Image (cartoon, rainbow, N blue to C red):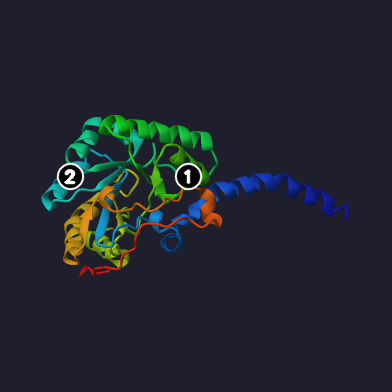
Amino acid sequence: MRHGFPAGRAVYAVAPALAAVLAHIGPAATWLPELRRRRFPGLAGRGSPGHVALTFDDGPDPASTPRFLDVLDGLGVRATFFVLGENAARHPALTRELVRRGHELAVHGWTHDRPWWPSPARDARELRRAVRVVAEVSGSDPRWYRPPYGILTSGRWAAARRAGLRPVLWTAWGKDWRHDATPASVRATVAADLRGGGTILLHDTDHASAPGSWRAALGALPDIVRDCREAGLAVGPLGEHGTDGAPVTSAAAVTGVRPGAAGATGTASFRSPAPG
């Protein structure tokens, strides 16, 4: 007993710190696609069955974003751009150009960091800073928030709620950040998971990706839009996606509190002829 007492006391000493870390990182379990689809369809970006939301992360970037804008113009498609606050502040004219061309601005945080250690004050401060920049540039308050890497910690849940933002992740992505991504691989990867009512995640920059990887997303974009249209699905921003169900606004919901009704789920899908 005497030998075990110091060890037991040590366990009691670290228990509060361990509990704090688990409470901080626990909500990040929503990064898991299957959990997100089954338990939190609104967070996954589920909307109207006949619509697909097209979203881009990490910009704006003067080397690549204008190319996406030109392709989107040619396709007659508007999208939602989750911009980083530091990039929007660094390139205000380009950020305004996104709005001028009819696209929707959303918040991706201030920097593209991984929030492994709890810092609620930092989370709140940096998100407020990003919201302020986006609002100043666009002339309206942003509605949507997607954290870097899709990692929603309890601090970022709380910060988003205080800022009036709704967290939205994705239902399908192109893995376009990889060094070996190609237009065909991006198209096929999106097609594997996309259904009507889904939200697509792509990147309009290599800011946090393999150098030049944005070219794969750009090359895949016309085919992805065409695949959706051939399946009878409209493509547009989150603001037109019908995601009007009750948002998940509490990190506690991830650990057992049942969320309210989410947006409608869709069943229409498409198959891409691109190789897997």
Name the residue at 33% across, 48% down. Answer: 209
Name the residue at 16% across, 57% down. Answer: 222
Label 2: which residue? 69
- How far apart, in angstroms, are the residues tagged by discs 1 and 2? 31 Å
Q: Name the foreground residue: 16 vs 238.
A: 238
Residue 101 spot, x, y in % from top left: 17, 40
Q: Identify the amino acid type marked 2.
A: Leu
User: In the picture, which quadrant includes the C terminus?
Assistant: bottom left
Which label's residue is closer to the chain start, 1 or 2?
2
Q: Name the foreground residue: 265 vs 4.
A: 265
Q: Quadrant of residue 197?
A: bottom left
Residue 272 spot, x, y in % from top left: 22, 68
Q: Is residue 44 above or below residue 16?
A: below
Q: Which mark is residue 157?
A: 1
Closer mark to the observer between disc 1 and disc 2: 1
User: In the picture, which quadrant includes the N terminus?
Assistant: bottom right
